[in-house]
Image (cartoon, rainbow, N blue to C red):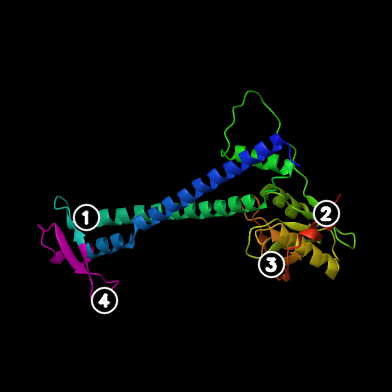
Amino acid sequence: MLTENVTEEAATVQRAIERQLHHTRKQIEALEKAVQKVGDYEALQVKGTLLKTYASQIPADLGYVKLPDYRHEGFEIGIYIDRSKSLMANAEDYFHEYRRAKRGLATVQENLTAAKQALAQQVERQETLDVTDVQQVEQVKQQLIDEGAIKTKVLHSSKKPEPAHPRRFYTTDGVLVEVGKSDQQNDHLSLTANPNFYWMHVAELPGSHVVIHSDHPSDRDLQEAAVLTAYYSKGRKLDRVPVDVLRVRQLSKPKGAKAGLVNVHGKFQTITVTPDADLVEALREH
């Protein structure tokens, strides 16, 4: 049974995660609106090109002109002209606006991609948080403090909590299986394990990284480890969950990627299992 203090701490962490998710979703919404606002920035380049192409045919005193849009047969595009400048200068202004909009869109799209990746990791952290695990709650709390999601008053220097150990289980055949509890721990577990050991993760869903401490696991080892993998994932409540199985050596860390994100190389096996809480408890290290 949880103590009152632990319950309060877990609730604090859960609220911080919810606030962080809300903030990230709002950020994504704003960035998507920014992408739409940039709109058809290529039209700026088209306008500059058309002004240069038709310069000899445009009267000098016009403030607005419609010219054939070479991107779409039979359509015209309206172009405003600053009459205090030459047509060539107007064309250069459109080219300048085009380049600026193109750079701005690239930055917005880059930020949008990063925000979506952050959201996926935050959702995974929420889904895999075990509020009954005191060490994991403390570790996630420290992560949220580091990310600015929990504000603290620093009165004196203090050490960060020791990293929580991965969940440990033993298959019926006695093989150790470790299951990560956080993005940082998933990274450490997956990237420091024996390259010949086996690694598992649910297919296309958030979940823990799982390492089987064997280079020749039996079919039963693989099946039981797959059940653990499915249980400690967003697929816990599903009837059937696909789990990818491969060697640790088939993993790599993308440069600059956030914790918990790895690339998979080469062929791998997929096992479909049903999450089983009773089996999980039976295999748990006591």
Magenta segment: 52-78
Circle on res. 73:
4
Measured in 3D between alpha carbons, the distance from the residue under mark 3 to the one under mark 1, in whole angstroms, is: 60 Å
Measured in 3D between alpha carbons, the distance from the residue under mark 3 to the one under mark 2, in whole angstroms, is: 20 Å
Circle on res. 284:
2
Secondary structure beneath dot 3 equals: strand
- Nearest to N terminus: mark 4 or mark 1: 4
Other residues around mark 3 within 10 Å, as few (<14) / some (14–19) / many (≥20): many
Q: Please name which of the two marks, 2 or 4, marks the residue nearer to the observer.
A: 2
Circle on res. 90:
1
Q: Nearer the viewer, residue 16 or 116?
A: 16
Q: Position of residue 94 (x, y in %)?
A: 27, 56
Q: Position of residue 284 (x, y in %)?
A: 83, 54
Secondary structure beneath dot 2 equals: loop
Secondary structure beneath dot 4 equals: loop
Measured in 3D between alpha carbons, the distance from the residue under mark 2 to the one under mark 1, in whole angstroms, is: 72 Å
Q: Are marks 4 and 3 in contact (CB under 8 Å)?
A: no
* Residue 3 among magenta residues: no
Q: Position of residue 100 (x, y in %)?
A: 35, 52
Q: Please name which of the two marks, 4 or 1, marks the residue nearer to the observer.
A: 4
- Nearest to N terminus: mark 2 or mark 4: 4
Measured in 3D between alpha carbons, the distance from the residue under mark 4 to the one under mark 3, in whole angstroms, is: 51 Å
* Residue drawn at (73%, 53%) of the image: 191
Q: Nearer the viewer, residue 242 or 187?
A: 242
Q: The residue under label 1 is which amino acid type?
A: Asn
* Residue drawn at (73%, 49%) of the image: 188
- Nearest to N terminus: mark 3 or mark 1: 1
Going by the image, does 164 lie left or right of 24?
right
